[in-house]
Image: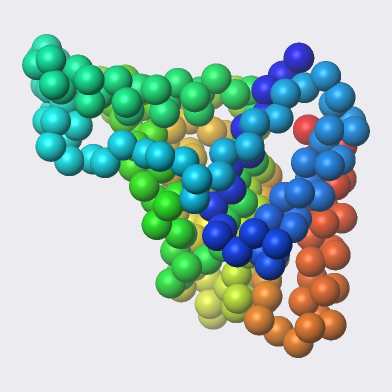
Amino acid sequence: MAKLLYIESSPRKARSKSIQVANAFLDTYRTANPDDEIVILDLWEKSLPEFDGYTIDAKYQVLHGQSFSEEQQVAWQAVVDVCDEFKSADKYVISLPMWNFGIPYKLKHYIDVLAQPGQTFSFSPDTGYSGLVTGKPMVTIYARGGAYSSEQATGMDFQKSYLNFLLGFIGFSEIHEIVIEPTLAAEADVTSTVNRAIESARSLAAKL
């Protein structure tokens, strides 16, 4: 039995195109993998540790190979708990809208907690950085109001480019992308775009 972690980062819920396509993926995945566990992580409901005070001090203790104070230990354990929850999965799905050419701040906060030395990446003077979350598939479902896949507009896309870089940095090499764009077109065009994305999501879910 495998565990799939679905990370949801849009607050629009029923109105969200990324969530709509992700739900289609999950429905098909459940049918194809009835014994697997699906965990849904709604970042708008998740309480995440702030990265200040004892937490940021603890990170520097890790970077310098030094021990924690009691307060730093407690603060760092909250970070480790988030990382452990993430790493416990065998497969992943992230759905996200584009906000100001990038990603929602809730997802950025989650990533800033996850991307920690000794948790999701390591560093060696000889080999450089190495991701620690390896051998697991990731599905990313992007929704964007405009069309950013063209050569003229791709330079404004800091949503997909950032997430791809970060996922690769922490070890992911099998990343399947589904892009829903433009979601601010005429209603009939958006419906057609979403339907194509749902078809792709269902096809991917059936074989993941």
In the displayed structure, would residue 64 be above or below residue 150?
Answer: above
In the displayed structure, would residue 190 be above or below residue 20?
Answer: below
Which residue shows up at 43% across the image and 72% down it? 100
Return the x and y of residue 183 as percentages of the image width and height.
68, 75
Q: In which quarter of the image is residue 18?
A: bottom right
Which residue shows up at 54% across the image and 80% down it? 152
| In the image, farthest residue toward the right | 31
Which residue shows up at 55% across the image and 20% down it? 88
Please indicate whether residue 191 sits to the left or right of residue 129 in the image.
right
Query: Who is closer to the viewer here, 176 or 23?
Result: 23
Return the x and y of residue 171 as percentages of the image width and height.
48, 30
Q: In which quarter of the image is residue 131?
A: top left
Q: Quadrant of residue 102?
A: bottom left
Looking at the rendered image, the quarter that the N terminus falls into is top right
Query: Who is closer to the viewer here, 98 or 154?
Result: 98
In the displayed structure, would residue 2 be above or below residue 189?
Answer: above
The answer, for residue 175, to whether it is visible in the render is: no
